[in-house]
Image (spheres, helix red, strand yellow):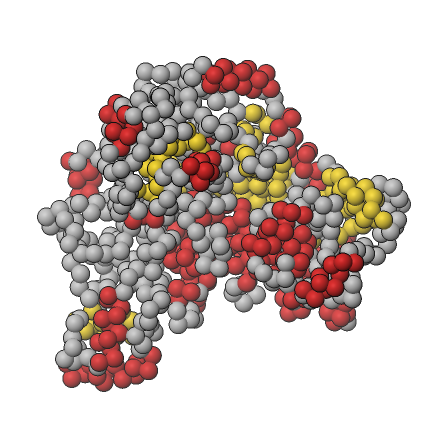
Amino acid sequence: MQRRGALFGMPGGSGSRKMAAGDIGELLVPHMPTIRVPRSGDRVYKNECAFSYDSPKVRGASGGALPKRRNSKIFLDLDTDDDLNSDDYEYEDEAKLVIFPDHYEIALPNIEELPALVTIACDAVLSSKSPYRKQDPDTWENELPVSKYANNLTQLDNGVRIPPSGWKCARCDLRENLWLNLTDGSVLCGKWFFDSSGGNGHALEHYRDTGYPLAVKLGTITPDGADVYSFQEEEAVLDPHLAKHLAHFGIDMLHMHGTENGLQDNDIKPRVSEWEVIQETGTKLKPMYGPGYTGLKNLGNSCYLSSVMQAIFSIPEFQRAYVGNLPRIFDYSPLDPTQDFNTQMTKLGHGLLSGQYSKPPVKSELIEQVMKEELKPQQNGISPRMFKAFVSKSHPEFSSNRQQDAQEFFLHLVNLVERNRIGSENPSDVFRFLVEERIQCCQTRKVRYTERVDYLMQLPVAMEAATNKDELIAYELTRREAESNRRPLPELVRAKIPFSACLQAFSEPENVDDFWSSALQAKSAGVKTSRFASFPEYLVVQIKKFTFGLDWVPKKFDVSIDMPDLLDINHLRARGLQPGEEELPDISPPIVIPDDSKDRLMTQLIDPSDIDESSVMQLAEMGFPLEACRKAVYFTGNMGAEVAFNWIVVHMEEPDFAEPLTMPGYGGAASAGASVFGATGLDNQPPEETVAIITSMGFHRNQAIQALRATNSNLERALDWIFSHPEFEEDSDFVVEMENNANANIVSEAKPEGPRVKDGSGSKWVIYNDHKVCASERPPKDLGYMYFYRRIPS
């Protein structure tokens, strides 16, 4: 029931006016065909505007007013996540039907004067539940249920006593995110998340083996309570007998203080974690207000989204594409703007950049904070719930409340930007570059050159190049001794890795064992190198801090890398086929199918042109080679990303894992697979007929192929690309144009809690820690995960 002419709104502003009763029916007649009653399952956003973050609780917001102080209680059941002090204010709920653009108001309820359809629709809207209720974890803390196992929990009399520190998982070497099972006293690690928190899931495995239902997180125990989880009930719970249950294992709850490693005030100096360094813990930071200094509230494991979006909207091209086009985007938004990508991007960009939601506290608020001894200025920020709900609705991971990887979300966002481009303008082009891959057969020395599109540069961590190896060895010996003697762990020593070593590791040739050589018509050995065929305006560099051990357990490198402010990568420029090099024949490898399964397999396989590209991109965003993802989706019959992922796990050790997909009767192979650049581009060879159309217009063949590869073989977009990239008209011009331009200046770092963005005007660093925005005193540039470099013009 939403249209430009008939909207439900909050109490009106000064421009609202009331109508005569006899005019109501006449004014509603033009809008009656568009009014419908919300059905079960419909999304009704009654407490959040689809176009802005204004509300009655935002000071200075249109149509809103500051809440009035009452008697320290809230009597209205509003779905909200605002940070106003709810104990000090209460809100009066006044509903009105507002008819735009003249802003006529009709107080509700109004059964006598409104048509029955309108009355029913109004009642349905007012009684609807929040569309975020199922996915909003903010309500967990206030609505934790008492576990049904707490009153009669069985505890084994096995003599287990838990020490005050030095904890370690009983099944692995992890010492963080440990959970104490309240039945048998086992100490085991929790689940693993992409921000390096969590563990290997041994606490859950123990429950499945034993059925012991309750566990408490070590490091959260205080006299006021602790984090308790019920495996059987699959949720966080309350244990009213927690003190008794902990005392069974020698833990005095009244004398515990919550720390991750269990150290008390009289212990030795605690370890300084990477998280504390990133947040500049212990440093008094000055809050920042105004345009560009608006924080994003944490929705529960939404740090990855906040980090990427703060960095994205620090880039002028994104600011112009969305916020600069705000009137046009909002005027032409669809009937349901909550489900329009460009509308929600514009809303978020305006919220971050306008300064409307980042204002310093007024004098009366400062006096109130002093009276309450709250000397820390309050920063509210904005809540990206509607944006997150839309951009993650079709993604199985981002739609969950689990922690995710910022790099994967960045690629997911780029994909959305490209699919929802505004006319010919595509702001994600600032990240786009071409990768030249050179594969050489080790026996014949013949080579093959291919190009593909990519959006980020992935740098490996060269652990073998650490400059403090002696310190690391000494630390490891001390740590093991402390663990064996149940003493507090020593202060952490991080490996110091030179950035030059990571860049060198990136540029070195990569072995391709059992490479199928078209010159030999057999499998052989090959080497692959990757170079930049073009440079982007903004180079996104990801440090590959996560890896998998031999047991397939994810691990993180806790390292310090001296990232430079200026990055020169001229030496990584592509050179193309060199004099004296001989190309490999353009012949596809044969597909060998066992006789006993050939008939069955051929009846199940699908046409390669029908491959589900959405499943392919979901897998590619996880970092797997694009061609491997295509084969996984193909050989699993388009059964979805989860089934295809299982295929990848089974086949990823095969020598032709990343080789192009080819099937008898379906023509040639797809182009080369992914490399350390990130495996994000769609790199199929453009159709020859499309290439011929462009060359018939007078453009060079290489230029046509390059344009089609950059636009997924879309003819119209390829022509736009050619006209917008005149420097690519001839190869020689490209070299001259790019000469001495491969330097870049770092502009931002994406961190788990939010990025640090360098303010161009004053060259100062700003830390965005969820809704808090402050001037950074000690920016830990050496601990970042993703870095955004701006290309320096010649």
Rendering coords of residue 692 (x, y %): 77, 69
Q: In this view, does 602 lie above or below 32?
A: above
Can the viewer see residue 275?
no
Q: Is residue 726 left or right of residue 328?
A: right
Q: In this view, does 756 lie to the left or right of 86?
A: right
Q: Is residue 221 above or below residue 622?
A: above
Q: Which of 377 and 771 is in front in this view?
A: 771
Q: Is residue 502 left or right of residue 25?
A: right
Quadrant of the image containing the C terminus: top right
Residue ID at (61%, 24%): 466
Q: In which quarter of the image is residue 227?
A: top left
Can the viewer see residue 336?
yes
Rendering coords of residue 778 (x, y %): 43, 30
Rendering coords of residue 484 (x, y %): 47, 16
Quadrant of the image containing the N terminus: bottom left
Residue ID at (43%, 51%): 400
Residue ID at (45%, 25%): 168
Q: In which quarter of the image is residue 335?
A: bottom left
